[in-house]
Every structure is written in structure tokens, then in C-alpha cells.
Amino acid sequence: MVHLAGRDQTRHRLDGLGQVDVVDSQPQQRGVAATAHVVRLSPDPTTVVAGRAVDSELRGHDDLFAPAHDRAAEQHLVVAGTVDVGRVPRPTKGGYHPRPLLPIGKLPTLPVTTRPALGSSLVTNAYRLPATMTVIGSYRGLPISDPQSMVSAELPLPDLRPHDVLVRVAAVSINPADVTRRAAAPAADTPTVLGFDAAGTVVALGPEASGYVLGDEVYYAGDVSRQGSNAEYHAVDSRIVGRKPANLTWAESAAVPLTTITAWEAMFDKFKLTPETRGTLLVVAGAGGVGSMLIQLAKKLTELTVIATASREESRDWAHSLGADMVVDHSGDFAANVLDQVPDGVDYIFSPYSKGNVENYAKIGRPFSEVCAIDGHPDLNLQPLMRKSITWHWEWMFTRSVFATDDITTQRDLLDRAAEMFESGDLRTTLTTEISGFTVDNLRKAHELVESGRTIGKVVVARG
């Protein structure tokens, strides 16, 4: 139950926020009207502000509010949750009359920071935002060497969908999917904003967003059907957002969401592995982003023997360091190199490079084995797998978000579970290259590295 202290003593409830104290204040100074709305969460008090730019009449609480000289801007501030707490009195010449407070999705939104205040309490302070944000994207698909392949632009802050959170982005990582999206960007007057993986701070909530409050630190892999994370602020469905691992930096956290989700879904949705599963798993390109997570997850959560493939010494060392039991060279005679290590073949194959390898998989795979692929090709011929009854799975981590499936929150759950594993030391970040400074030149450099096909682990661009 919410207690309103002030002129309006109505009782309300804020869904998903538990017990809250709400303070309404209608300060007037030099005839300028302003309203404030303060929400304090229990048992760990956190305060956020919504309403007009304000002065505070609450003695000792001036740090919660905007300074007086900003009143004339008449910008709105942020409030946590669905701000449907009734009607806030507004001062007029004849006294007070009620004015509805808009849902958060309709308000301009602000970044937040937390700091000690009011004794031992944590105070979430809302700061103003401009109406636009800087993004990095592409107006049309071009080679990365073309100066116009990636440009900076100003766009309005995104409108929030019901389940969305707005995140102030602190770091992003670059995946092969980012390279593909940039190269295939359609010609348009509005740029395609690039980026999937991100880590940052929640600064606004849609009316049906759940699981988060302002100031929460999160990480996620985004949605291919929406504008990307290479921006100051990014709107993303809260149901596919996970709690940022507390022991990882922004860059270390941004390195892992997409690859963790892909590896997790391949193992547990497609292969249906369990903690008791034994046998052999072949991870093609074990030093890549997904391969690096797959090796770790398989060693921690199953009884499988993990065989990784790598062609360079540094790649082989990396795969071994992540826990691979064996590392084989995938250059030259790929199938023969694997069968030299496991003459009876393997039970599971993870395939990020399927074109040209189906016949190899038919040789390597045991009867009734399974392949999970994350790359698609229109001319892929799976016929060689038939004689051994080898099952072929497709893994596309955007399926749940694009189609808003009933189990969409599975991705939030697995990211939260992964966060626990990072914090316990069962998993480690796969960040290997961090570029400081969120600029076009740095994003272009990151794309060039990933496009080379020779990166180990993940490349991340973080705000300087």
C-alpha cells in the first residue's frame, strides 16, 4: 500500500514495487507553479522524482529535486513503474485542482545515478535529458572501408513499448551479426542503428515493464527487429534483459549476452542436455564468441567431453584455457583431424560455419547424433546426414523476441542464472579487446576486427 503524504491523502498501489512511500509537494516560488512526486521503495529506500521541474519545500531533501533556475524549462522528470498513482494536485489561482499524471511511456526520460544520501539510504536522482540522442548507424549497406558505411546521427529518444525499459548504454560488443546487419542495411532516410549486445543502467520503465526499477544495472542482447544498441539510450523489452553480473565491468558484461543466450539455447533447448549428459561435444571455432561460452557452459553444467576446433596457436591456447578437453585443427582435412582424436565419432556438433561442412559432419557424427547450426545458407544440402539419422537443429537467439513467444522470459532467466555463474567464478567473461570511446571511428575499428574473422573472444566498445 502507498501512503501519500501531503495534501492528497489518497491510498494507492504500485504494482511490482511492493511497499512505497509517496510524497506529493506543490511548491510555489515567486508565483511559478511546480509539482513533484517522490517514490521511496522499502526496505531499501530509493527515491525517484516525477512531475514538472521543481523546487523542494521538503527541508533537507533539496538534493532530490531540480534547481530553481530550471523551472522555466517545464521538462518532466522520471518516475519508477507505471505512474498511475491517481491525480496530483496542481496549484492554480483559485487553489488546487487534480491533474492526471502521465504514464512513464509518454514522458521524456532521464538517466539516473545512485549515491548515499539521507543517512544510509540510497537516493536515485533523476537528471534531465535532451529530446534527442546520438546514435551510430548506417543509411545503406556499404563495405566497412567506405566512410559512409557507419555514421553518427541525432534521433529522438525512442518511444517505450509496454514491456520496455530504457537503458543508458555504457558498453556494447560487436558480433558477426552486427557486421551482417551493417552490410545489408537498406537505403533509408533514417539510419539503421547498429548493435545488439549492451550493458547499462535502467532510466525509464514502460507501463508493463517488470523485474526492474530505475538505477538497475542490466545486460542484454537486444532484438534484431528493432533499432540497435549503438546509441546513448536504447529501448529493449524487459523480458529479455538480465541483471548485470556484479563482479564484471560494463565492458566485460557487454561482451557476453548474445553468445551466452545462443550457447545456452543450443545446449538446453536444442540438444536437451542435462547435468547427467555424457558423450562428446564438438565445438567448431571454439575460440569464437559463442564457442567460448559453449565450452565453459558444457564443462560446468554437463558431463560431456568437449572437443574444440581451432587453427592458430593462440586460438588453441584460448580454447584450452576455457576448459576444452581436446583441441583439433579444423584446417586441412577437418574430419580426419577430429576422428584421429575420437575414432568413434561425436554425439553433438555445434556449427557456426555450416556451408561446406555438412559432409564432414556426416563423417564425424555418430549414428543418431545431433548438429546445431547458427548460420543459414539457401543452398545448404543436408542429404549426407540421412544415412546416420543425424538430427539438424537451427538456433537463432532472436526467435523469442521477434515473435514474442509465450516463454520469452526464458532469456531473462538464463541471463540471471549466467550472472550468478559469473559472480561465483564458474564462468568468465570472453572480453579480449576493449576499445574506449563511443565514436564512429572506434565502432568502425571494432567492425573491421570482427569482419577479419581472426578475433579471439569478444570485441567491446565502451564509453570513455
Image: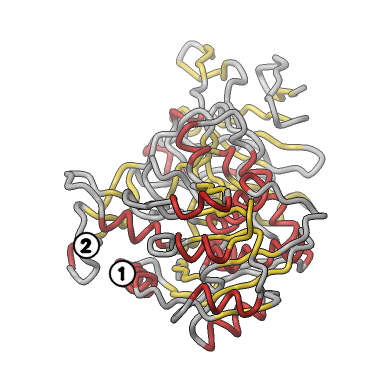
The answer to whether residue 62 is above or below residue 58 is below
Q: Nearer the viewer, residue 294 or 199?
A: 294
* Within-10-Å neighbours for mark 2: few <14, some 14–19, many 20+: some
* Residue denoted by label 2: 149
Q: Quadrant of residue 430?
A: bottom right
Q: Residue at x 74, y 60 (%)?
A: 421
Residue 78: x %, y % from top left: 52, 37
Quarter the N terminus occupies: top right
Residue 123: x %, y % from top left: 67, 48
Q: Nearer the viewer, residue 260 or 94?
A: 260
Quarter the C terminus occupies: bottom left
- Describe residue 430's horizontal placement relative to residue 183 as left or right: right
Residue 315: x %, y % from top left: 53, 81
Q: Nearer the viewer, residue 426 or 150?
A: 426
Residue 133: x %, y % from top left: 34, 50
* Within-10-Å neighbours for mark 1: few <14, some 14–19, many 20+: some
Q: Which tag, 1 or 2, sits closer to the chain's start? A: 2
* Residue denoted by label 1: 444
Count how many numbered circles sit on residues in the image: 2
